[in-house]
Image: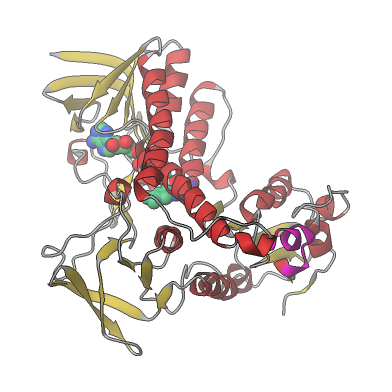
Amino acid sequence: MSDHFDAIIIGSGQAGPSLAARFARQGLRVAIIERKHFGGTCVNTGCIPTKALVASAYVAHMSRRADEYGVDAGGPVSVDMRRVKARKDAIVAQSRTGIARWMEGLANATVYRGHARFAAPKTLEINGQILSADKIVINTGGRAFIPDMPGLGRVPYWTNSSMMEVDFLPEHLLIVGGSYIGLEFAQVYRRFGARVTVVEMADRLISREDPDVSDAVREILEAEGIEVRLNAKCIAVEPDGNRIAMKLDCAEGAPRIGGSHVLLAVGRRPNTDDLGLEHTGIATDAKGYIPVDDQCRTTVEGIWAVGDVNGRGAFTHTSYNDFEIVAANLFDNDPRRISDRITCYGLFIDPPLGRVGMTEREVREKHIKALTAKRLMTSVGRARERSETQGFMKVVVDAQTKRILGAALLGIGGDEVVHALLDVMASGQPYTAISRTMHIHPTVSEYLPTLLNDLKPLE
Ligand SMILES: Cc1cc2nc3c(=O)[nH]c(=O)nc-3n(C[C@H](O)[C@H](O)[C@H](O)COP(=O)(O)OP(=O)(O)OC[C@H]3O[C@@H](n4cnc5c(N)ncnc54)[C@H](O)[C@@H]3O)c2cc1C
């Protein structure tokens, strides 16, 4: 049995559902195919559940600090992991069912549940059924990368996905990977009460960031009792009674550590190996990503790749922006492009890191004549009032054009406040658009003019 559509979307990540809705609104017959949970990574095993856990961990942390604020919390703080998980599951379920109902209720749209695989460039096979379409959009996302490490077959380990089922407190969590995903879990589980060790093979955490950002993040985490092992490559794991032993290749510190559980957070890989791409003529790059042009078009006419799978972004907002780009080009005669967007993302430890544009290191490497300013969060009134003064704000500005090149806001509200800089960057205005604007007191944002009025040449 075969069915023909105007468009088929494979995967219901952050671009697929919105694109399906747009195709349908244009009066086109569209199919959307999902093999697991509607909403994909972000909704089910990524952004939303992790930030729900971050919220519970924050409450635990602040409850332990209650006395500092003159509040009697009524005894030692304990965390009920089952209720933490139940809260997280309820938040996830709301989003997941919301998307499923949206798709199922869409006029002109048909929902298929199952694994889709190309049988020919414009033909897919799903559950033994053949579907074809003039346009196909691949939004299949990615999954945790599992390294080829000796012993992994002999010990249990978690990834960001299996971690979502955990409803108990691990005694000692060993996290392999000191980047964004690993660090969020590290702080969350430490705040829940676990002993946590982070093993990172680079000489600093989140090594894509500037060294001062990495160092400040490490200090914040270590101050909470998280053990950080840098320059330490996890080379093997093995069972040790009912615990797990990890062998490290490291110049200093113990070459063998033990813990009760292991979380692998060493990167992601795209879901392209099981898509039957060999039947389309689309070749993936060395890491399995699907190369696309500036408007998310693959090398095969009529096939787009959006979201993490195209390797041009690794965030929910980049995936959603891919949807906007494809829709704008297809239906609105609006030539939006990937290259128009400004890099921006958050690291959602507490306090969070809000990042936009270039790092200071990138500015130096490009030999751009620049100005910079950096202030500790201890200078920010709002941070002091709340006794949450960790971190700093740093901004880099082009000395000639006066446009903001990039910023790192590590501190309370940093993930929100950074948008003021982002919007001015996007509007093409100089930094004075912010520094000459009156802001609300007492907020973190009111400190941006002070920061920007302190610019000095980048030495
Ligand atoms: C722990 C964690 C935390 C994160 N936190 C953040 C954050 O705070 N902010 C942020 O911006 N980003 C975050 N991310 C990244 C974010 O989740 C992804 O960038 C985002 O989900 C974009 O995904 P996508 O649209 O490419 O597809 P995905 O969301 O990965 O969805 C792809 C969908 O396709 C389905 N699928 C795959 N293959 C097939 C097939 N052959 N047939 C049918 N269906 C298929 C999958 O089941 C899945 O539902 C986080 C990621 C992780 C892992």
Farthest-out residue, front: 74
Quarter of the figure with the C terminus: bottom right
Quadrant in which the N terminus appears: top left
The answer to whether residue 167 is above or below residue 238 is above
Q: Position of residue 352 (x, y in %)?
A: 58, 58
Q: Which residues are magenta?
A: 378-388
Q: Is residue 75 above or below residue 309?
A: below
* 212 left or right of 122 in image: right
The correct choice, above or below, for 105 with respect to 400 in the image is above
From where the camera sits, is residue 47 visible? yes
90 with respect to 246 (left or right): right
Left or right: where 103 falls relative to 336: left
Q: Position of residue 109 (x, y in %)?
A: 35, 14
Ligand 1 is found in which quarter of the picture?
top left
* Residue 371 showing in the rendered view: no
In the rendered view, tell whether residue 253 sits above or below residue 345.
below
Please tell me whether the stretch drawn in magenta is mainly helix, strand or loop: helix
Q: So how many labels did they put on this image? A: 0
Q: 63 or 284, which is in the foreground? A: 63
Residue drawn at x 16%, y 65% is: 152
Residue furthest toward the bottom? Answer: 252
Q: How far across and how far down the image is residue 332, in percent?
A: 56, 22
Q: Nearer the viewer, residue 148 or 240?
A: 240
- Residue at image coords 49%, 61%: 76
Q: Residue at x 83, y 47 (%)?
A: 440
Whether residue 299 sits left or right of residue 154 in the image: it is right
Quarter holding residue 340: top right
Membership of 110 in magenta stretch: no
Which of 307/204 is in front? 204
Residue 184 at what x, y percent from top left? 45, 58
